[in-house]
Image (cartoon, helix red, strand yellow):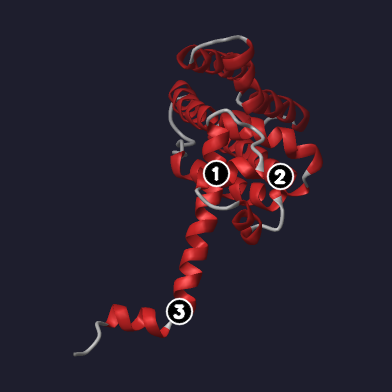
């Protein structure tokens, strides 16, 4: 009786099977770290990560040279999550409509990334890998502001444009969102309204 192709492939390519298992273990460890952080454990130990992933502590360090490498991989996974939930806002159309669309999208992203961002900020001073990824994320947010509100920014004197750009970037940053949600204890809806109000004040005043 002839073996099925799938069975034959498995028997003839044991390395492929090991590679697949290794990749599954690696993914499980990364997802375990993100799950712990999302649950409020901002600096989980390797032992807690291993327990959540259902693997041995040794397995964690077989797949990652150190915790910094694991955190860097998790940061890359988080960036992909952010890209998936980001909706591009049109750069034309009425200003108030753009502000509303931008604020809704930005609030959704900032709320989703908050636990991981808090964890990343704890590591940023000590990890070049995390610092690099945070710089990229901040630059990405800044470029989105510049794109959506290009009509209001373009044509201004350089100093005036730069000042408005800095104000818009600060008002829509994760740091501002954290202040609204955590330090000022606003609901998600309230924080979103405050952000929109701030952007309207800046853009209409400067129009």
Looking at the image, can residue 173 be seen? no
Residue 205 percent location from the top left of the image: 61, 14
Looking at the image, can residue 47 be seen? yes
Query: Closer to us: mark 2 or mark 3?
Result: 3
Please name the residue that numbered disc 1 is placed on: 51
Badge 1 density bin: few <14, some 14–19, many ≥20, Cα 10 Å: some
Q: Quadrant of residue 164?
A: top right
- Among numbered discs 2 and 3, the one appearing first in the sequence: 3
Judge whether 111 appears above or below 17 on screen.
Answer: above
Real-space CA distance between mark 2 and mark 3, rounded to the nearest whole angstrom: 36 Å
- Among numbered discs 1 and 3, the one appearing first in the sequence: 3
Please name the residue that numbered disc 3 is placed on: 14
Q: Quadrant of residue 45?
A: top right
Please name the residue that numbered disc 2 is placed on: 130
Q: Does residue 201 appear to the left or right of 130 in the view shown?
A: left
- Quarter of the image with the N terminus is bottom left
The residue at 68%/29% (across/down) is 165
Real-space CA distance between mark 1 and mark 2, rounded to the nearest whole angstrom: 24 Å
Q: Does residue 118 appear to the left or right of 80 in the view shown?
A: right
């Amino acid at each position: 009786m002839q073996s099925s192709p799938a069975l034959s492939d498995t028997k003839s390519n044991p390395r492929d099977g090991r590679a697949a298992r290794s990749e599954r273990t690696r993914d499980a460890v990364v997802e375990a770290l993100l799950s712990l952080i999302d649950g409020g454990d901002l600096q989980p130990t390797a032992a807690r990560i291993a327990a959540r992933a259902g693997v041995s502590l040794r397995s964690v360090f077989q797949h990652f040279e150190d915790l910094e490498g694991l955190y860097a991989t998790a940061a890359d996974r988080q960036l992909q999550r952010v890209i998936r939930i980001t909706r591009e806002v049109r750069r034309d159309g009425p200003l108030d409509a753009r502000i509303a669309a931008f604020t809704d999208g930005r609030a959704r992203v900032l709320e989703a990334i908050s636990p991981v961002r808090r964890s990343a900020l704890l590591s940023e001073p000590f990890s070049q890998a995390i610092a690099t990824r945070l710089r990229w994320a901040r630059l990405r947010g800044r470029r989105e502001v510049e794109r959506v509100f290009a009509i209001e920014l373009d044509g201004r004197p350089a100093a005036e444009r730069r000042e408005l750009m800095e104000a818009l970037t600060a008002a829509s940053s994760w740091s501002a969102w954290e202040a609204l949600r955590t330090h000022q204890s606003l609901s998600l809806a309230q924080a979103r309204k405050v952000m929109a109000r701030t952007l309207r004040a800046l853009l209409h005043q400067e129009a």
